[in-house]
Image (spheres, rainbow, N blue to C red):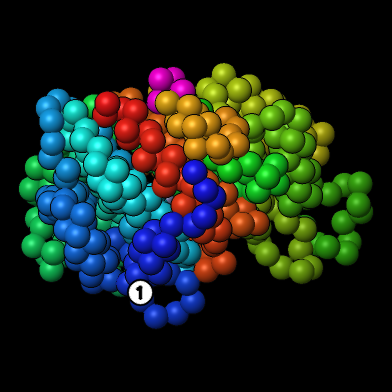
């Protein structure tokens, strides 16, 4: 097969990008008019290829190719975006799924079991702090207690659902995972690895585990000019050493990351030695034992630095999520499909969370990545070459064909 872009897919990517709040990039938040209009548009595209669609009780868009018997193969991602995000995060996974179905239908392929295309509601978590709302409901988790979560305009989730004719108390009706046999999600890599290694398809092995901490470092506030350097108990200098230390620890092994994203100092005055400092720490690893080791080494190092600097450090856990391995069989199916399509592949973990990590708790789940230019995502600059997007969709079509033959 050629490496040419797929015209219909390119058209779809451009068409979907019309549904956004004004401003740079794409802003299509959960439960907004923009997202609802995008669903309507996508529904029309689905009807053109003979799919029937609806929006379920939790705001998931579901289009069905009802054919054959047995559990459905579910394919898709999400259409909600971060504020001023790009055209590809989530959207490409849904549109590539539609395009894969289109390719199969054009070929006259008849699946032995249904194929469903899905766009999950609120993957991004940017409006109501209700991450993976749609996939959780689809998998039968009880999300009805989230209705009072509020957005920046003080609107509750329950209120935001009303113009959609959806009621939070009924959202559990979206549970449909029992009719699904497996889930496959195509996504943009959102990192630089494929591009740097000039590879075309990433086969995801696992979605990273992560732990978060809030770390309080306590020293002593004192006069900036009259306190001799050797007598200072400077909480910020201690925290600075800790931050650089965890960076080195994470750099020392493959597939681990450490990030300090928030830091604050008190009393925060140019002529006062910082008496206290707090910072956040996010640690990630592709496997749980590696994460446990990373965590233990970081904790020890933070403690040792506190002792050396005559400071107190307390570590408070804020979140913890286990690594989620992708299904071995689906990893092989995706790899084989890519090979048949003539695409170069690499196995790699996903450093970001996705709907697939939720689905993987209930059914076998697999993911494939296509390259992100410059590794940029959650930005108007997000871009995936049309050739790479088209190839990804063709690989996805082969995956669906293999799973449905
Ligand atoms: Zn995404």
Which of the 4 image quadrants contains residue 356? top left
Give percent across and percent down for residue 350. 52, 38
Say which residue appears at 45% left-offset and 79% top-offset.
Answer: 23
Q: Residues within 10 Å of mark 1 (few under 14, many from 20)?
A: some
Main secondary structure along the magenta-highlighted residues: helix
Give percent across and percent down for residue 194. 63, 44
Say which residue appears at 73% left-offset and 56% top-offset.
Answer: 274
* Residue found at the far bottom of this picture: 22
* One can see residue 28 in this view: no
Which of the 4 image quadrants contains residue 140? top left
Say which residue appears at 57% left-offset and 30% top-offset.
Answer: 347
Out of 200 and 121, give the one closest to the viewer. Answer: 200
Give percent across and percent down for residue 71. 17, 27
Say which residue appears at 16% left-offset and 45% top-offset.
Answer: 64
Out of 168 and 390, give the one closest to the viewer. Answer: 390
Out of 272 and 74, give the one closest to the viewer. Answer: 74
Compared across the picture, whether 133 is left or right of 91 comes to left
Q: From the image, which quarter does the C terminus lie in?
A: top left
Find out whether residue 127 is within the magenta segment.
no
* One can see residue 96 in this view: yes
Compared across the picture, whether 271 is left or right of 370 comes to right
Q: Is mark 1 on a helix, strand or loop?
A: loop
Total tally of numbered discs in the picture:
1
Out of 73 and 313, give the one closest to the viewer. Answer: 73
Give percent across and percent down for residue 398. 38, 36
* Magenta residues (range): 328-332
What residue would you read off at disc 1? 18
Above or below, comparing residue 81 to residue 395 in the picture: below
Find out whether residue 329 is within the magenta segment.
yes
């Amino acid at each position: 097969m050629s490496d040419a872009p797929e015209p219909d897919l390119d058209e779809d990517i451009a068409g979907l990008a019309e549904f956004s709040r004004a401003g740079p990039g794409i802003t299509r938040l959960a439960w907004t008019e923009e997202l609802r209009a995008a669903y309507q548009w996508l529904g029309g595209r689905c009807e053109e290829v003979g799919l029937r669609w609806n929006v379920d009780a939790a705001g998931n868009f579901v289009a069905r190719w009802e054919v054959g018997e047995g559990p459905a193969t579910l394919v898709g991602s999400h259409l909600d975006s971060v504020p001023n995000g790009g055209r590809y995060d989530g959207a490409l996974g849904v549109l590539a799924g539609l395009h894969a179905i289109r390719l199969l239908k054009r070929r006259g392929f008849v699946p032995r079991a249904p194929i469903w295309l899905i766009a999950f509601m609120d993957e991004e978590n940017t409006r109501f702090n209700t991450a993976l709302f749609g996939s959780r409901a689809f998998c039968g988790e009880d999300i009805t207690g989230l209705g009072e979560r509020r957005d920046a305009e003080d609107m509750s989730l329950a209120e935001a659902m009303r113009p959609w004719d959806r009621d939070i108390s009924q959202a559990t009706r979206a549970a449909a995972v029992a009719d699904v046999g497996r889930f496959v999600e195509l996504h943009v890599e959102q990192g630089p690895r494929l591009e740097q290694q000039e590879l075309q398809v990433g086969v995801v092995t696992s979605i990273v585990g992560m732990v978060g901490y809030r770390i309080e470092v306590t020293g002593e506030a004192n006069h900036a000019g009259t306190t001799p350097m050797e007598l200072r108990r400077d909480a910020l200098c201690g925290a600075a050493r800790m931050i650089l230390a965890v960076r080195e620890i994470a750099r020392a092994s493959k597939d681990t990351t450490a990030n300090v994203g928030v830091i604050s100092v008190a009393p925060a005055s140019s002529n006062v030695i910082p008496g206290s400092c707090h910072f956040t720490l996010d640690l990630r690893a592709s496997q749980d034992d590696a994460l446990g080791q990373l965590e233990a080494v970081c904790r020890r190092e933070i403690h040792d630095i506190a002792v050396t600097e005559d400071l107190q450090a307390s570590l408070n856990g804020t979140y913890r999520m286990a690594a989620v391995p992708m299904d071995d069989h689906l990893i092989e199916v995706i790899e084989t499909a890519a090979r048949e399509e003539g695409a170069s592949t690499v196995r790699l973990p996903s450093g970001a969370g996705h709907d697939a990590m939720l689905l993987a708790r209930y059914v076998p789940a697999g993911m494939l990545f296509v390259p992100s230019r410059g590794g940029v995502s959650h930005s108007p600059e997000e871009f995936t070459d049309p050739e790479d997007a088209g190839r990804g969709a063709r690989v996805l079509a082969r995956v669906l064909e293999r799973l449905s033959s």
